[in-house]
Amino acid sequence: MRNSFNTAGFSEVVHEIRNDPAEAAFLYTAEAQSSPYRGLSARIGPALFGTVKSARRFSVELRDVSDAPGADGPLPMHLALTGIASCALTTLVGGGSAQSVVFESADMDIAWDGGAVASRIDVGGVPDDATVAELVDQVERFSPNYTTLIRPVPVALRHGPGAAPASAGTAEGAPAAGRPAACQVRWISGTQLTSAPLGPEPGEELRVDAPKQLTGVDWGPNPQEYLLMGLAADVASHLGRLARELTGRAVTWRVAVRGTEDVGGLLQADPSAVVQLQDMECAVAEPAGLSGTELEKVVVAAWAASEVRYLIEAAPAVRLTSHRVESCPV
């Protein structure tokens, strides 16, 4: 076990996938609520790890997109960026551990400016720049969330009575630039990481971990769950704001997001596996007090306004750099 990373456990998962491809399908769910009384929150729901059901329960209180600067709590975009960066670092450390690389540190700063993503990975303890470049190349090819960022991934949008039928989102072009967001994700040990917002505004530190089925200890939501919570919360936040602006009504909105990861791609167990997230779907529950016409108007506007939705569907401009941190002399 290098870097407290259970490479033997991952090898066992690879063996299970090769024996039964159904074990590679990991289904995640997340929900968000925007309430005029209780604010904005997000949580994860039950997951399906291959053929194993897992009752998971983590929640985050969020700062609403429409809140004034300086309000407490992370923004929905912070959750999404946390999901992307933590997945990248987990892929980097996991890949390095499999190659007998011992890390002293691994951090990733990631920022969204309203139209593009800039990120930088700092790695300590790696012997040379060529090894760093090789590990970053693996991130770009095998990190599920990072590849979701750089390749367009459609998200089906459902709303209305019973949240059916399903239809593809039709938002085109970049949404109006919202509030910039940035965070720093730090690898702690094994599959455990932390994320903290960068900048003058306060924000709680978020814990990230892999599920036990992927050798984690359930210290916090995993990277995919953070990305899904970010999407659900961003859409819910815009629904609340736009309902007030377009209809004059303040109502409670509930949004559910789901997506599937083929871990055979991450673990390189199946060369044909799709690495990025798949079968993504966002369902908006019908709130009380709005007509069908008002609901349609608000949902379409909120979908178009969501920057996290754009991040996933549009493959915006992305810049990733890396830096090898020199080891401190003993």
Image (cartoon, rainbow, N blue to C red):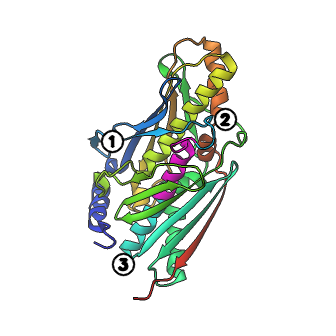
Crowd band around label 2 with a 10 angstrom C-alpha radius: few (<14), some (14–19), many (20+): many
Please give the name of the residue rendered at 68% of the width and 53% of the height, measured from the top-left corner: 116
On the image, numbered disc 1 is attached to which residue? 48
Q: Is 100 situated left or right of 300 in this image? A: left
Mark 2 or mark 3, which has the lower sequence index?
Answer: 3
In the rendered image, residue 77 lying in the magenta stretch gets the answer yes
Q: Is residue 169 above or below residue 135?
A: above
The kind of secondary structure element at disc 1 is: strand
Q: Which residue is mark 2?
A: 305
Q: Which mark is residue 100?
A: 3
Occupied quadrant, residue 270: bottom left
Quadrant where the N terminus sits is bottom left
Question: Nearest the camera: 326 or 175?
Answer: 326
Across and down, in percent, residue 306 comes to: 63, 37
Q: Is residue 193 visible?
A: yes
- Residue 150 sits in quarter: bottom right
Q: Amino acid at mark 2?
A: Ala
What kind of element bears circle 3?
A: loop
| Real-space CA distance between mark 1 and mark 2, rounded to the nearest whole angstrom | 30 Å
Which amino acid is tagged 1?
Leu
Q: Please rate how many residues cluster around mark 1, counting C-alpha atoms within 10 Å: few if below 14, some from 14 to 19, many from 20.
A: some
Distance from disc 1 to disc 3, alpha carbons, whole Å, reads 31 Å
For label 2, the SS is: helix
Give coordinates of residue 115: x percent, y percent. 70, 49
Q: Give how far apart the Cα atoms at labels 2 and 3 are.
A: 45 Å
